[in-house]
Image (tube, helix red, strand yellow):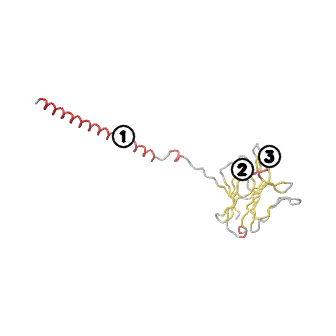
Amino acid sequence: MKKVFLAVGLACMMAISGCSSGNSNSQQSNNSNSESTDEVTGDVTDLDKPSQDNTDKEVEKPVENVVLVGDTITTDSMEIVINKVELTYDVLPDDTSGFYTHYPADSGYVYIDLDVDVKNVQKQDLMCDEILKAKADYNDGFEYTGMAIVDDSSKGFTYSNISSISPLATRGMHYIFSCPQEVEETDYPLFLTISPNGTTETYKLVIR
């Protein structure tokens, strides 16, 4: 009889121990789930925060200035004098007394001719294809890019990519824009945007 009671007692003790262990494992599992949830919440919160670097950055925008014929554009490396701007069907050099090269417009087209003098104020040679970029805007959005040519005393004009300006020397240049003939025949707005190399500033030259 005593053996029966001992067996029953042992069975009850094992049952109580199993319940206690189950509760402990359940509590540990709940704690682990809670910690995981906290970690995920923290990560999401960090992702939602705006980057301080992005908010502090300011985009540097070009500064536009209005210039007229006769004005001088000055940078750290050059001085650019605007001599004249005109529409022409043939771009001619200053001296046409002998042999010279010139740029006649194709049929149905006209040139905008921007005539400038460029002085090199730096101590190194200045390549003529690194002076500026120029763009013509016709009737609020029709854009044409200028091509640089350089005055040459022996043949009229020469190419900008093989020409340079010595320190403190001045050389004449033209920026020519091939446009449809309509540009010359109408009165719609027309202007040039001049962007010298080495600066963020731009210059607007209104033709009409």
Q: Residue 24 in the image: state x and y as whole percent.
A: 27, 36
- Residue most toward the left? 1
The answer to whether 21 is drawn above or below residue 74 in the figure is above
Residue beneath label 3, please? 166
Where disc 3 sits, the SS reads: loop
The answer to whether 34 is drawn above or below residue 131 in the figure is above
Mark 3 vs 1: CB contact within 8 A: no
- Residue most toward the top? 2
* Nearer-the-camera pick, 208 or 6: 6
Q: Residue 138 in the image: state x and y as whole percent.
A: 67, 64
Mark 2 vs 3: CB contact within 8 A: no
- Residue most toward the right? 98
Residue beneath label 2, please? 74
Q: Considering only order in the chain, which callout, 1 or 3, is on the residue closer to the N terminus?
A: 1
Label 2 packing within 10 angstroms: few (<14), some (14-19), many (20+): some
Q: Is residue 83 left or right of residue 141?
A: right
Quadrant of the rendering where the N terminus is positioned: top left
Identified by mark 3, the residue type is Ser
Where disc 1 sits, the SS reads: helix
Q: Residue 83 in the image: state x and y as whole percent.
A: 77, 57
* Nearer-the-camera pick, 101 or 65: 101
Where disc 2 sits, the SS reads: strand
* Nearer-the-camera pick, 47 or 25: 25
Mark 3 and mark 1: Cα distance apart in space: 73 Å
Residue 177: name its quadrant.
bottom right
What residue is shown at x 69% (from left), y 48% (from top)? 198
Q: Which label sits on residue 35?
A: 1
Q: Is residue 110 left or right of residue 44?
A: right
Identified by mark 1, the residue type is Glu
Q: Considering only order in the chain, which callout, 3 or 2, is on the residue closer to the N terminus?
A: 2
Mark 2 and mark 1: Cα distance apart in space: 65 Å
